[in-house]
Structures are given as C-alpha cells and as structure tokens.
Image: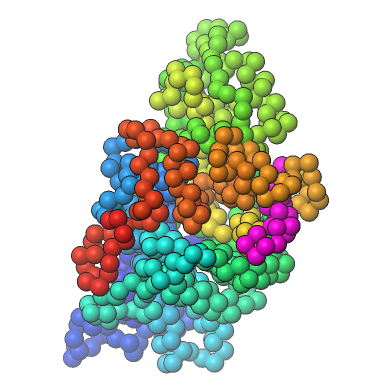
Amino acid sequence: MSKKLYITSMLALAMLAGCKKDVDTTSDPSLYSTSNYPTTLNDLQSTLAPCYSILRDQNLLGFNLIPKALSNATHTANSAYNGDASWNEMANTNLSVTNSYSSGAYTSYFVGVKNCNVVLAAADLYLSKFAKGEEKTAVDLIRGQAYFLRAYYYFQLECLFGESYITTAGGGDKMGMPIYNGVPTDLASTQVSRSTVRQTWDFIENDLKQAATLLKGKVWSGDERGRVSEWAAKGLLGKAYVFTQDWANARTTLLDVIQNSGKTLMPFAKYADAFDGNSANEFNEESLFELNVDPDARGNDYGIYGGKAYNSTTINGLIWPAWALGSDGTEGGAQPLGYGNEVVHDKNILRFGYNIGTYNLVANPAFSGTPTQNNPRLIMDPVYRAKALQVRAAKTADPRLFVNTVQPWIDQVKPDGVTVYPASKPNFYAGQANTYGFSFRKYSPVNYNVNDPSPLKAGANGPADAWNQYLLRMADVYLLYAEACKGAGDNGTALEYINRVKRRAYNLPLTAPSAVDYTSLSSTTSAIGDPVLGNNPLYYERWAELFNEGGWWYDVCRWRIGASEAAYFGTALNLTGAIQWNDSKSYTWPIPLAEINSNSKIKQNPGY
C-alpha cells in the first residue's frame, strides 16, 4: 500500500453504502444513490484505502492493541503505570464487559469488515454499470485485496472473541462471530446473531481462497509494495488451517508458500536490524504482509489523535521505549525515549536463557569532576559486564534476546538522535539489585525520542513510530508448517523447520545441520525453569521468534496454556497480588456491553 494511501473519516462515512449522494431534489436526501459512484477505476480504488488504513486506528495497531492489551495479557511487557483500569484488567487477564481495549478492538475490526464490504459492493456496481472490458483484471485485484483484508479482520475477531478454538475434541459448534457478508441497508440488517466457530472459520478460509485466486501472479512494486498478494493470502490461509487443526490442508498450503512464493528467511544481519525503522529493510525477502507506517506525525499532533496526519502512523513506541542513563549519570535519573510506561517483564530474560543473574553497581574508578551520562559515579560491576559480554559472544543465551531488548549499561541509545548514552534500567527499578531492567528494542525507539515534538530535529520523527510492522512473515510460516507436520505425524519434517528458524537466530546456514539443533520435539530449550516451554521447541520457538509482535496471545489461547503462563510470570507491576487467570473465561475476551445492548440477537461469551 502506498504510504500516501490514507483514510479520512469523511471518506469512510461517505462510502458507508458504497456510493455518494446523488444531487436529486426529488429523492429522499437521507438515502444514497447507487447510480453514480464509483464511475471510474480511480473512484473504485479510493474505496479500498479505508480497508488498509483502519489497521492504524488507535484501537488497533495504531496504539492500543499491542502495548496496552496484548503485551500486558501475555506479560511480554511489565507495566509501571496502574492508572488505567482497563490496562490493569489486561495484565490480570480478568476483563470486564466494558474494557476499553477489548471493546475498541471489536469495534474497529468490524469497521474494517464494513470497509471491505463497501469495496466489494462498489466493485459489483462498477462492473455492472461502468467498467470497460479491459478493466476487469484491475477490478479483480481490488476485490482480491478486499477479500484478504476482510478475512484478516475476521481472523483477529474470531481469535479474540470466539468462544472456542477447534480441536480434535470439538469446538466447532461453539459461538463464533456475527458474519456480515454485505453492507447493512437498515437497522434490522445490523441485528445479526453469532455464527458457529466452524462457520466463521469457513467464511475466513473462503475469503482467503478467493483472494489468492484473484491476486494470482500479481507482483506489486514501487509505492504499491505494501499491497497484499497471492502469497499473503495463502500464508494466512495456511495459518487458519493450523488454528483449526486441519493438518492436511495446512501442510499443502504452507508448503506451497515455502516452495513457490520466492520468500525465505532474511539473513541474521538484516534480521537484527529489521524492527527499528531502517527503511532499507521494508518489504524484504521474509515479509508476506506488513503494516506501512509513515514516521511523520506532522509536528506535535500525535498522528492518530490529531487531524494533520490521521492514521498515517503508529505511536506504540510511546509506551515501551528504551531507557537512557540519566544526564546526571544515575539510574534514578534515567529517561525514557517516550513515556516509558512499560519495560520487558524480567521473567522473559530468564526465558531467553540468560543465566548469569542480575548486576550490581560499583564505584567508577575513572570518575572525575561532574557526573554525566558518560562519566557516572557508579557503573555496572566490571566482572558482571565481562560475563554479560561473554553471553553474547558465546551465544549461551538465545541471540534473539538482544534483537528484542536493550540491556542496561551494555547497549547504547540516542535520546536526541545524536548523543550516545548508556542504556539504563528504568528509573522505577533504580536501586533494586534483583531486577534486570531490560527495555524493548523491537518496535521501540532506541535512537530518537518518540515523544519529541520537533520532527525536523536531527534524529527525531515527532511523536510517531518509525517502523513498519510485520503482520505475516516467513518465520511464522516455517513454524506453522512445522506444527502442521507434527499434527500430521511427520515429526522429522517438523523438527527440521523448527531448526531452520533457530539456525537463523544463531546466524547459521538454514538447511545445514548444526550444533544448536534440537534433536527431538521434546528437547530442552533456552527457557530456564519453564514447565511448558522448557521442553517444547515448537512452543518456545514461536514465543522467542515472534516476541512482541502481537501473536503470542493467540498461541496461549489455542494451546490452552494460560494457567501455566500466569503461574510462570506470577504478577506484574500494575497488579496487587497474583495474576487472576480463570480457565473458564480468560481464553476469550467479552463481547462489548455496547454491542450486547445494540444487537438484540447477539449472545455474550461464558463467564461474562
């Protein structure tokens, strides 16, 4: 998708019925004409923009969904901020029916569904009334994108709000999502009951098959590189098959992507630099579908909140930025490169296999004069520092730890985009010896302050993120294929594709056996003291490889390991007491109260 293909709220409203008002004083002015829009291919193309740009809505990937909801629910992040009840509920995995983040996601994903239905209706109208014969191919490409995006939105809705996943034990007859296969024309047609889980997944899979067919062979280039492709559709279709344990179809579909898409795992050198705003890494050889982000919020406008650059960017980095040592050379004066509400939960550091414990501060023998960030009175114990550097050199901890995180005192950051500071623990951990205090690197500002209101300042973007977000990449496909092979009883192939992902993480050739290979599907992993991930390479690799990309919650729920996860992490900074996991309700989010009140046919999930 072009970086300039933005939605405006007026367009979304104008296209609600797939057309614009006809200037006809004899007709009802509250109705929309179906006779004069879209009349050109460009008109039709314009209806597609909202289908993409809703992804950057503040309720979705623009801000709230990953840092405030999913990263808290999975305890990828630990939140120092406890002034938001809905945020706290996410960390507690004990949601109310009015939780603002689950409600916002539900609403905005269905807006995405509506936007796609508008495009499909407009395409039908255009083909029937205005299209020239040679435009059929172009119209089909537009329809293919709309089918993919509608399936993508329903995929997210079903995983978050569906009553159950489908397993060998059943689940297909449980409550799925209300299915809207067109644009409602009156209030009565908005009153839709929930289809079954099986019907919902069938709808998703059918849309993806249509998308793959309509987009077959199309290669996007230039400013259109971000548009979805046949291979994005087949990759997501394979994922849907895995999530419904349809192992045979999953294997066939995912192997097709692996062998014929032309995509592969990017080399480690690129991988280590692929999540922090380097535009050279966008739409690379591993990416099947990614969210295009424009790192320019038009000054102090906060992108998604202001009117100057509506939905052009994301601001997740405000919540989980890296931390710099204070300008006074202390951890107590540490400064976040944003708001700094969240850091990496300490238990994740152990899970990556980091086994040398936490550090102490000692007097700096080189200190003299006035303390500054590069002349502190206290420094990390040099003995510990040497051990920490050896962990990296010898790769005794999973190297993805350092792709995903920023380590205090070892790593460096640039709060003003120019001056180098040692990384620090967050100031709320200052003086706490038994804390690791790692902050985020993946999808996090490390070399500029995301809260800086001066986009023309060196190294600054204004209050905006600088990185595209991967929504589907080949590492995910490899691990999904491994899971499908395991489910079908082909453990050898499953193990090989798990090992290919691990080899890339250790900067080794993908297809050659190596010393880091797992030897079985129950081999010991890097996850120290973890009763579930510690001896399950498939689970561990999905957790480590896709860390902080927003998908771990779905794996936790479909594998039903929520109780174990809650026990492993124990608690969070924004909670009092233990995480309140409840197997009878926590695996699914509640249908929002507002939806229950407005749709007389919809039913709530059990436990709410």
Identified at 53% across, 36% down, the residue is: 348
Q: Residue 604's x, y, as percent?
A: 28, 63
Identified at 32% across, 65% down, the residue is: 9
Number of disc labels: 0
Relative to 154, is 528 above or below?
A: above
Identified at 73% across, 59% down, the residue is: 493
Query: Is residue 469 something that shows in the picture?
Result: yes
Q: Residue 363's x, y, as percent?
A: 55, 8
Q: Which residue lies furthest to the front in this view?
A: 169
The image quarter containing residue 180 is: bottom left
Identified at 63% across, 56% down, the residue is: 479
Q: Residue 201's x, y, as percent?
A: 47, 71
Query: Front-most of 25 and 234?
Result: 234
| Residue 71 painted magenta | no
Relative to 545, is 477 above or below?
A: below
Q: Main secondary structure of the magenta part?
A: helix
Q: Which residue lies furthest to the right in this view?
A: 512
Query: Tell me, what colour scheme is on the image?
Result: rainbow
Left or right: where 128 falls relative to 253: left
Query: Front-most of 459 and 590?
Result: 590
Quarter of the picture holding the C terminus: bottom left
Query: Is residue 1 something that shows in the picture?
Result: no
Q: Residue 461's x, y, as percent?
A: 47, 44
Left or right: where 384 falls relative to 260: left
| Residue 489 painted magenta | yes
Look at the image and give the residue range highlighted in magenta.
Answer: 486-506
Query: Front-most of 134 and 69?
Result: 69
